[in-house]
Amino acid sequence: MQPALFVAEVKVEMDESLVHLIGIAAPERPPVSHVVMSNEAFRKLLADGRQKLHRNAN
């Protein structure tokens, strides 16, 4: 799998302890990226993103 800078779709799969972010460049094509992180790290990433969006909106 080659690194991808832009993807058309991100599929999120969760299990008990991990979050998988799977990048898809085009329908009916294999994934072009796959990032795995803990649920805790994913929640922190979302919280940090919300804070930055809120600061930029004001």
Image (tube, grey):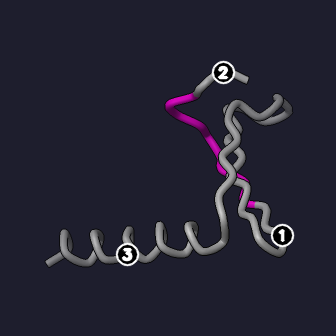
Between the C-alphas of marks 2 and 3, the distance is 29 Å
Residue 5 in percent (x, y) is at: 50, 31
Q: Closer to the N terminus: mark 2 or mark 3?
A: 2
Residue 50, label in figure: 3
The quadrant where residue 40 appears: bottom right
Tell me the residue at 48%/73% (across/down): 44
- The residue nearer to you, when weighing 25 against 18, is 18
What segment is highlighted magenta in the picture? Answer: 4-12
Residue 18, above or below 54 = above
The quadrant where residue 38 appears: bottom right
Does the magenta segment cover residue 11?
A: yes
Q: Closer to the N terminus: mark 3 or mark 1?
A: 1
- The residue nearer to you, when weighing 16 against 50, is 16
Residue 43 in percent (x, y) is at: 55, 75
Residue linked to disc 2: 2
Q: Is residue 39 left or right of residue 47?
A: right
Tell me the residue at 77%/71% (across/down): 17
- The residue nearer to you, when weighing 47 against 38, is 38
Q: Is residue 54 left or right of residue 37?
A: left
Tell me the residue at 72%/46% (across/down): 22
Q: Nearer the viewer, mark 3 or mark 1?
A: 1
Q: Residues within 10 Å of mark 3 (few under 14, many from 20)?
A: few
Tell me the residue at 43%/77% (across/down): 47
Amino acid type indicated by mark 3: Arg
